[in-house]
Image (cartoon, rainbow, N blue to C red):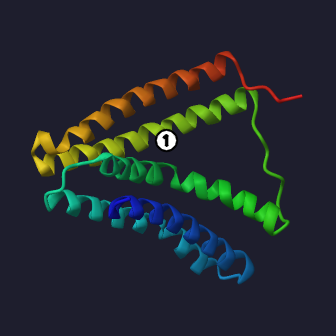
Amino acid sequence: MNFLAWLIVISEIGFWVLILAGFITRYFFKLKKLGLILLASTPVIDLILLVATSVDLYRGSIATQVHAIAAIYIGVSISFGKSIINWADVRFQYYVMKQGPKPVKQFGLDYAKHYLKSWGQHVLAYIIGAGILFGLIYLINDSSRTEVLSGFLKVWTIVLGIDLVIAISNFIWPKREKG
């Protein structure tokens, strides 16, 4: 794997380390402000990844799948980051701290609404990630070096459409509780 691929892996690990450190600081050490600072600093990881991706391409690299995945990762991280932290917070409180209500699995109309909200977050991730991809394409200004980025953008557009169909299908055929 190249440096940028490792940086994506490190970014994901760093995201979860910051979340865990934020929860431990908040709940075990009762340092709520420091815990909030740790949780709120997760976008710094995205900024580092964005700078590294941009610099790599600016210095003459030909865009690869890794560059496109970095842009998608940043979009998804920014768009879904807060809800992922909230999801993890509820589970940390219940399973680790033995506090709060048990996390509830959603079914039926509640699940369909939740999935549609997630699709809205996917749209936001797409806007952010596509903006980064377009920005990188514009920055490089050489279609032979950025062909992969354009290809990923096309595929992601199709994936976004499929996700919308799935979101709508949840209203037509609601998810049911097993058993």
Residue 20 coordinates in the image, percent (x, y): 63, 70
Q: Is residue 52 above or below residue 162?
A: below
Taking the spot 40% from the left edge, 53% from the top edge, the residue there is 74
Residue 32 coordinates in the image, percent (x, y): 64, 77
Q: Nearer the viewer, residue 119 or 137?
A: 137
**39 relative to 173 in the view: left or right:** left
Q: Tell me the SS state at disc 1.
A: helix
Say few, some or many: other residues with alpha carbon within 10 Å of mark 1 (under 14 / 14 to 19 / 20 or more).
some
Residue 33 coordinates in the image, percent (x, y): 59, 79
Q: Is residue 51 above or below residue 145?
A: below
Q: Nearer the viewer, residue 174 or 157?
A: 157
Q: Residue furthest front?
A: 1
Taking the spot 47% from the left edge, 54% from the top edge, the residue there is 77
Q: Residue beneath label 1, please?
A: 121
Which image quadrant is residue 104 in?
top right
- Kind of residue indicated by mark 1: Gln
Q: Residue furthest right?
A: 179
Residue 101 coordinates in the image, percent (x, y): 83, 55
